[in-house]
Image: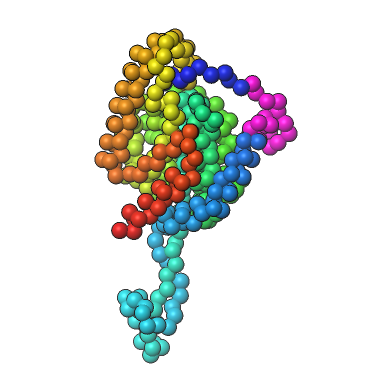
Amino acid sequence: MFGLLARRPKPSPPVDAPARGGLRLPADLLRKVRRIEIATNRLVDQGVAGDYHAVFKGMGMEFAEVRPYQPGDDVRTIDWNVTARMGTPFIKKFVEERDLTIFLVIDVSGSLSFGSRAILKRELAAEIAALLAFAAVRNQDRVGAALVSDRMELFLPPQRRRTHVLRLVREVLDRPAHGGTDLQQGLDAVLSTLKRRSVLFVISDFLGSPCSRALKAAAARHDLILVEIVDPRDQEIPAVGPVVLRDAETGRVALVDGKKAARRHAEARGREREELTRLIRRLGVDRLELRTDRPYLKTILGFFEQRRRRLAR
């Protein structure tokens, strides 16, 4: 999984702030977490929370109360026991029983640390995770998460707290990956731990062969949504002269013929995406593609609207 060779930023000096195990967090990391919190909360206020509520329904309906029948009420909701006792028609009122769990599986393998535009794929993944998590918390739903590479790096049990979301963002941005992309093993570990049925978002660039077995198991037990993080250079590399490439997961550097490498890369990536597309169609799950070179709000709102219409049929 080669990417263009890029200079790595120097780490910032640590500053006083709560962190894992009482350690201090770098100033640039704190700024990124705060920026993501402000930006995603603004998007939640702009309508994401309402669209989220309309799309992701609770587990069912629960009884609330009875009230007198009014013309136009559905006769199927008449409570016949109360009607007989009171001598006049009464109907049952129900409210949505949300009790919903949103669970985010976020790929933090080396390939997510690449970005050819203004934002790294991992930073975009953190923003999307924050947006979904804050929308869920705003709707009083629980949010949990797991960070995966070729194993499960971290498991955060579902909670309803803002600080829980902030920790998730910090972990996505800061936790180093110890392996390459192998969602098969990472998802297997998550599914063995996640017992409750959830709305399951898998956020990854899905480089490499699709993890067919794990995605099939996830789709059978959860409402599965794949969020594909795409950078333009994932699809193509410059077809010019010699190009220095570095594998984002192994660190290996190679000097290659740009034209030949570009052709082979495009063909391989095309096959991978076709295979993933066929798998998604076979499983009947949702897919949301987000790119590092384009704004994502309209794409997400469009996805919510399309899903709402489909579920309403």
Q: Which of 5 and 184 is in front in this view?
A: 5
- At x 39% / y 26%, what residue is drawn? 235
Residue 210 sits in quarter: top left
Residue 180: in magenta span: no
- At x 66% / y 35%, what residue is drawn? 30
Quadrant location of the N terminus? top left
- At x 41% / y 36%, what residue is drawn? 228
- At x 55% / y 26%, what residue is drawn? 176
Residue 28: in magenta span: yes
Magenta span of residues: 10-30
- In percent of width and height, residue 99 lies at 46, 56
Residue 70 sits in quarter: bottom left
- In percent of width and height, residue 274 lies at 29, 31
Relative to 10, is 39 above or below? Answer: below
Q: Nearer the viewer, residue 4 or 67?
A: 4
Q: Which of 51 and 159 is in front in this view?
A: 51
What is the residue that sits farthest to the front in this orientation? 240
Q: Does residue 134 show up? A: no
Relative to 174, is 58 above or below? Answer: below
Q: Is residue 58 left or right of residue 16?
A: left
Q: Does residue 233 show up? A: yes
- In percent of width and height, residue 233 lies at 43, 25
- In percent of width and height, residue 162 lies at 60, 48
Quadrant location of the C terminus? bottom left
